[in-house]
Image (cartoon, grey):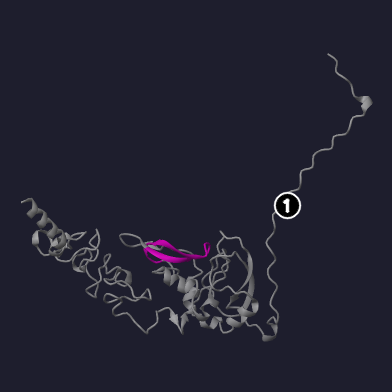
Amino acid sequence: MCILSIWLLSRWKKFGKRAGIYGCPESCAQSKYGCCPDGQTASRGPNKEGCPCQYSRWGCCKDGQTTAIGPHEEGCDDCRYGKYGCCQDGSSKAFGPDFAGCPTTTPAPYMLGGTVSPSTIVASCGLPQDQGQVCSSSYKLAWYYDMAEARCAQFWYGGCGGNENRFGTQEQCEQICVDPPGLGRCYLPKVEGSKRCEQLTPRYSYDYISKQCTAFWHTGCLGNSNNFLSWEECQSFCAGADASQVQVNIVPYRGPIPISPQHNLQPPLIPQQQLPQQPPPPPPPPPQPPQQQPIIAPIVPSIPEESRFTYFK
């Protein structure tokens, strides 16, 4: 009996998981998170993730596959909540596993002529973080470009309102606000880099309104690609970038002073003869901390020999 039991146990360890428990076919009941409400589909998470949308609280979206995350088909337009997630462009909805149904030749909506649309860059990257208003059962994680930290960072989005400085993925944020291809970098706001770095080096950034490159001090890390080693390189690379390509009525980031968004972006008329022929000098170096003056000990005058006295006990 002992030998037979050991043999049966070894056979079950080898084939038991394939056949299920007690010889029954493997089912969703044996999965990590159990069954969906349909009793057949295995749940992919503790909150019934991956279950058919018809069994969820808010039902299905119009496509019959995407699960709504709130009333009035909330979340149906967000590819992140679709059954198969987002395509590689970060904004289109996949219609099957392995990016099935995703566009292969159609660029992302924010792409234009091989680069990111200048209007998208200007309307997004220089704006502050805006959580919007809470209009769903919970906040959603999103990405934005942080001008102070000079990088893309996450924040909690309320679900409604807000501004254009909001992206579904880190890759999308960086492709638009850190290193857009082609002339897109010429429309980025000037970013001096992270304040955590102190390796100051002179660099040049392009202003698409004045069509001029200006010098600034870069801290040595982070920032964006509107960052050129020389004035000549900056002017040559961005020669074709101007405000006529921007179709938004907002003023780009100019610093911490708030600017009214109602101004029209019209490039100033600069006669060709007024353009500088030589690169402007680099900005003056930052002020150095005051040097500590050496401490000089006070001079003690010597006492003449005849003025000294002897103490007697």
Residue behind mark 1? 291
Quadrant of the rendered image containing residue 72? bottom left
Relative to the observer, which residue lies in front, 211 or 39?
Answer: 39
Given the current orientation, which residue lies at the most extreme top position?
313
Q: Secondary structure at mark 1?
A: loop
Q: Answer with left or right where residue 184 lies relative to residue 29.
A: right
Q: Does the magenta-highlighted stretch encompass residue 155?
A: yes
Residue lying at the far front of the rendered structure: 3
Magenta region, main secondary structure: strand
| Residue found at x 69% / y 54% | 289
At a point 58% along the width and 66% down the height, the residue shown is 192
Q: Which residues are magenta?
A: 141-161
Disc 1 residue type?
Gln
Mark 1: give few (<14), some (14-19) or many (20+) Cα within 10 Å: few
Report whether 253 appears left or right of 31.
Answer: right
Q: Position of residue 284 (x, y in %)?
A: 70, 66
Q: Residue at x 65, y 82 (%)?
A: 270
Q: Where residue 39 appears, x then y in whole percent?
A: 13, 64
Q: Classify 41 as above or below 291.
A: below
For residue 185: magenta?
Answer: no
